[in-house]
Amino acid sequence: MVARCALTLTGKNILVLGAYGFIGAAVVRALRCRGAQVTGLVRKPVQGALLLDGIKLVQGDLRRFTHPQDWEAALTGIDCVVNCAGALQDGPSDDLAAVHHHAIAALGQACAQRGVSVVQISAIGATPNADTEFMRTKAAGDAALEHSGADLWILRPGLVIGQSDYGGTTLLRMLAAVPLVQPIAYPATPVQCVGMEDLCHAVVTCCADEVPQGAYDLVEDQAQSLRDVLATTRRWLGFPAARFRLVMPPVLTKAVARCADALGYLGWRSPLRSTAMTVMASGVVGDPAPYRAATGRSLRPLPEIYGSMTSAREHRLTARMSLLAPLVITVLSLFWVLSGIFGLVGLPEAAGVLTEAGWADAAAVSSVVFWSFVDIALGLAVLYRPWTARVCLAQVGVAAFYVLAATVVTPGLWLDPLGPLVKVLPAMLLSLVAWPMVQSR
């Protein structure tokens, strides 16, 4: 373990962009532990308040902060800005050019005018001619900050390994959770990692002006193959070693990425999207020498990073649930859509159950048609990510209504050999299981 210097940020007011994200939340905690007064700029203050108790929050969407004057209120009384915000791909709620470039260019100009320093969390491989729009827009934002004249540190972390997970770390843990077989794409890809603790320490030293201004890659000294990174992750989680390795061919990997991109239009931010796959194919490799020369220290290698972190039951459970989540949502959607379709296809028989219970023909037919369309609507709506959690609860409510109504109107269905009411119970439970699986952060 490399010794940490006891830095203090007492008296400093620091604004953190993307404060409740994977990196942002850890940075906020590290800055507070050093005595800084931290303000978080977040999209959703209600969610931020739950995750960042005691932190002053300012509501803001970087897509709306594209001119220097847009930053005036947020920068009032601020000494330093740490930008932890970012998005992987364009989508309904993400605009890479605005978030990575235009907003950050405006931030740089506003900070230069006010004497506010900036710590920019960029990415390894962020160059103007990179293969992905993510990297190109990150590079454009970095360049704009460099030309702004503001005091600036640019940190480019490798694959970030933290106690929690997001993005690439989530993908690693999902793959590690596959029993018996270890699926992997691009197993020989070189990867250099950085521990979240080391990343946060680098941010603190920059905010304290203890390291020269400039751009630094935050990576371990030696690269290792993605195969070895995944094996180390699997051991840390406590999963048995895989008996077989299944190397995914590039054509299949690209097909999976295209499907994940399509799901992005429904709001699903999958770690399997094409940007992540492109980065995985090209590798995550930086130069540790400049940071080592500036600080006199190397960053910990992956075994030491994992050795400093606790692996518990909740980490294994989260990895397995992340792996199962797509299957659970797919099964829920099919169950409700097919239930509605079967109701319409078998309309005479379904309505006959109600007429035998004394309902008028028109009322029975109308009821079956109405609730069949409700089933179909719930089955389709659960696929739209912003609605998924609420739809899961709606499914439970509708299913409970079906059970209660059927018990009152047609209690004989409980004794039906096909068990239509009995089968509703596990469907309700599956919706309840899915509900916490899709909670944001």
Image: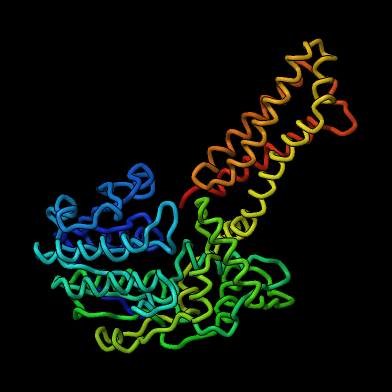
For residue 352, above or below residue 33: above
Q: Work out whether residue 78 or residue 310 is closer to the camera in this orientation and state it.
A: 78
Q: Nearer the viewer, residue 279 or 295?
A: 279
Quadrant of the image occupied by residue 144: bottom left
Say which residue appears at 79% left-offset and 14% top-offset.
Answer: 361
Describe the colour scheme in one phrase. Answer: rainbow
Please state the horizontal and vertical placement of residue 200, each as a whole percent of the image: 33, 69
Residue 222 screen position, x and y as percent = 45, 88
Q: Which x, y percent locates residue 123?
A: 37, 74
Answer with left or right where residue 74 lies relative to residue 229.
Answer: left
Number of numbered discs on residues? 0
At which x and y percent is residue 191? 49, 81
Q: Quadrant of residue 103?
A: bottom left
Tell me the residue at 57%/67% (across/down).
257
Q: Residue at x 21, y 62 (%)?
A: 81
* Image quarter of residue 436: top right
Report the front residue among 134 and 114. 134
Which quarter of the rendering shows the N terminus? bottom left
Name the side, left or right, on which 264 lies relative to 43: right
Q: Is residue 370 left or right of residue 114?
A: right
